[in-house]
Amino acid sequence: MFQNVNPTTTLTLEEAIEQGLTAHLSYDFEFLAEDVPGQKVLIFEEDVHTDQFLDLHDVYVEQDIAGMIFRGNLQVDNSIIDYEPDTYACFLSVEGNLTCRNLVAGCVPIHVKGNVYVQQTFIGYYNHGEVTIDGDLHARLWIEDDHQTTVKGKVHAVTFAPKDWTAMADYTDWHDVLLPEVAAQLLEEDYLFAGNVGLIRLIEDGQLVFKQDLVRTGISSDEFQQLLHNELFAPGLDSLLVAQKPWELRLTQHSDQPGGWEYDTVYILNTEEGRSCVMATAPGMPLSFRHEVADNRFEEVTDFTSAPGQLLLRYFTRARALVNAKVNWNRYYRKTVDKEQLWQLIWLFNPGDNTDFFLPIATELFHRVMLAADYPYTYIHSRYPEDSLRRGLDEVPGATVPIALLDGLLDRGLIAELSHNKPLSGEVGKLNEITTLYWNTILKTPPPYGENPVSEEYMHFVNTEMQPQGAMLVRLNAGMDNYLLACIQVAAIPQLKQLADTVDVTVED
């Protein structure tokens, strides 16, 4: 295997399995031994130091080596690469430390009990492999793309996770880490799979691929403005809350309007560390930096090499990653809404003929739904956080648009929400508010309807009386247990069903 080192012991894969040597690795080796007989496992009792390039898939395919176990340290003055994402490659089990130039893991199982020292780049790609590091990880750059890497110790590396929504990585945009000429060569519509053969070949060949200044040493005015003026700011919004435990960001944009914010500010709080910092500027003023030294008492930071300066740089990097993650989340959950159909739908809830009265209400409802469609993150977490929490929209963000419409109608008293598990006698007052508005009618709840929750049977009872007068009670359903009821003219129900369906609301009569 190695030109200068021979294995102490060579076992068959079946023997290694019987001796429990593969039990700590996450793979079905019994299946592999049966499916591909004749595989070997090499055991090295002493430290191994080599300058050979290790292609772990090639070792498996060409040399029939299922895995290698190192009782001591493994130092490779070259790259260790697995080009195979999906099937199998030679496993590595290192009981000491692992040192190499680059480490690229696809489907391969790798377990290191000590520390891992990667001089340049560590990549874990695709979801069939697993890397477990019991100690610390030291690398210049760690890229994790839908992989299963566990580092039980500390991470000493700049981290990157493309299109990540968790904001656990320092960077989430390939343009932030790739050299511009490499980005132009490899990116397709800003997308690149970390297991891309072209990318890995460049790394194997020792080509410069990634920017050399990934460790932040300062914060420019352009970087500050880029963070502040992000895609989550809906038109007309001048303040924004972005949060994910333990991070909280409060961003405000300067406005000359009465009551507007005087400064452009980014406030960053880490609730676990109990530390915060703030960056601010205004037209004609330089960018300033402060860190909190006591409750509501901040001191200026002028030296980024100082402890407060290093904290501020770390917080700013995390803030950028958090905002980028939420921007990606927002892009994913955006919905396309036909504005003309939405406008027509809203006007079906006009309780009378007074268009001047209903116009501002319709406009408000329209903008609320469009905010949910174009800026679902902002709608849920910044503009309507209480309504969204009550509806659980953070768990089902795909329902933001229909819920925005229904909650807007509720807020304006144009529909009624009745509990699905409370007696109707205690809920009918809400219903009578809208029947009075639309029909000037008070509904009755004769037995047995009053003692039970609202039901289809009760709706049928009401509609039997109202339908001859050209009106009906309908349920607007967007997947909620409660009954959201509206008073609609019978002639308008077909149009209501058609238009409501465009925003994922079902009309039940």
Image (spheres, grey):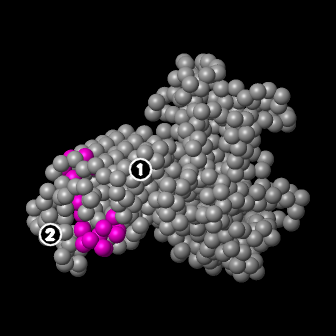
Q: Residue furthest right?
A: 356
In this view, 13 is above or below 329 = below
Is residue 67 shown in magenta? yes
The one of 164 and 160 positioned closer to us in this rendering: 160
- Residue 488 shows in this picture: yes
Which quarter of the rendered picture does the C terminus lie within? bottom right
Say left or right for 461 vs 365: left
Q: CA distance from mark 1 to mark 2?
A: 30 Å
How crowded is the residue under tag 2: few (<14 C-alpha within 10 Å), some, or many (20+)? some
Q: Residue at label 1?
A: 101
Q: Are marks 1 and 2 in contact (CB under 8 Å)?
A: no
Q: Quadrant of residue 255?
A: top right
* The magenta segment: 56-74
Q: Disc 1 residue type? A: Arg
In this view, 270 is above or below 375 = above
Q: Disc 2 residue type? A: Thr
Q: Residue at label 2?
A: 12
Q: Position of residue 11 (x, y in %)?
A: 13, 66
Say left or right for 122 vs 32: right
Q: Residue furthest front?
A: 4
Q: Position of residue 147 (x, y in %)?
A: 41, 59
The one of 181 and 504 positioned closer to us in this rendering: 181
Badge 1 marks a residue whose secondary structure is strand
Which residue: 58% across, 67% down? 478
Which residue: 79% across, 60% down? 362
Badge 2 marks a residue whose secondary structure is strand
Say left or right for 469 vs 148: right
Q: Quadrant of residue 501?
A: bottom right
Is residue 8 shown in magenta? no
